[in-house]
Amino acid sequence: MTEAAELPPAPEQARTVFGERFQDAVRYAELLAETGVQRGLIGPREVPRLWERHLLNCAVLSEVVPEGVTVCDVGSGAGLPGIPLALVREDLKITLLEPLLRRTNFLTEVVELLGLDHVTVVRGRAEEVLGKLPPVHVVTARAVAPLDRLAGWGVPLLRPYGQMLALKGDTAEEEVKAAGAALSKLGAESVSVVQVGEGVVDPLSTVVRVEVGESPGGVRFAAKRAKAARVGRTRRRR
């Protein structure tokens, strides 16, 4: 095993953000620092900054997620941002979508250990589950792909008038400009860059919010969804 720095104590902000789930957040941080590093899910150099750069950075995404909605965390990896979001928002019904088996195994272990009954782990790629998973109100993602590619995977999973929330870095504004045409074709009606985490994280977390109209993904994906739904109904009848 690669030598990793020691996990620092949880900052005081974590107690405020995670509330009653604070101890579960600590356990998750420990799992990332131990099992996550051992299985190659995160790099050992990330351990000293797990709280600020990863857990809290993701948890503050909750500030822009509506109440009581369904969420699909695309390319969930080691559970970021899906697990921190689940810890602070038990009103949400969250699907962690991840194609790699070793990652879904880890996610399943975490969900069971922390008793996250409102979280489901699904192994697969976004394009594979289109029409098989129920459309969601919100798609989340972090460090998955450039915005234009990410939107091509995430936006079609949305319900009409849903939104994709992508945690991005300093290049958020540039990515929005570069992805303008692609987002328009995918049915995006509004794209904005917002910052969250005031008083919790420094620098603030940057979120690209893509809001869609009545045809998430555009005409092409509407046809794909309809075809997948027909196939699903046929299989169920058999």
Image (cartoon, grey):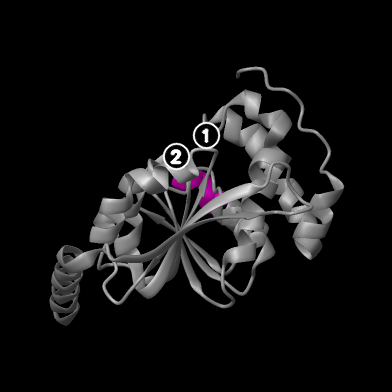
Across and down, in percent, residue 111 comes to 58, 57
Q: Is residue 99 visible?
A: no
Magenta region includes residue 104: yes
Residue type at tag 1: Leu
Residue type at tag 2: Arg
Is 225 positioned to the left or the right of 2 in the image? Answer: left
Quadrant the N terminus occupies: top right
Q: Residue at x 58, y 49 (%)?
A: 206
Circle number at residue 41: 1
* 50 up-or-down from 44: above or below: below
Q: Assign a secondary structure to mark 1.
A: loop
Nearer to me, 220 or 126: 220
Q: For mark 2, what is the residue?
A: 102
Mark 1 or 2, closer to the camera: 1
Is 97 positioned to the left or the right of 202 in the image? Answer: left
Q: Is residue 232 visible?
A: yes
- Which residue is outermost to the right? 12
Circle number at residue 122: none
Q: Residue at x 47, y 49 (%)?
A: 76
Across and down, in percent, residue 209 comes to 47, 59
Q: Are marks 1 and 2 in contact (CB under 8 Å)?
A: yes
Work out how far the residue at label 1 is from the one at label 2, CA to CA, in angstroms: 9 Å
Q: Earlier in the sequence, mark 1 or mark 2?
A: 1
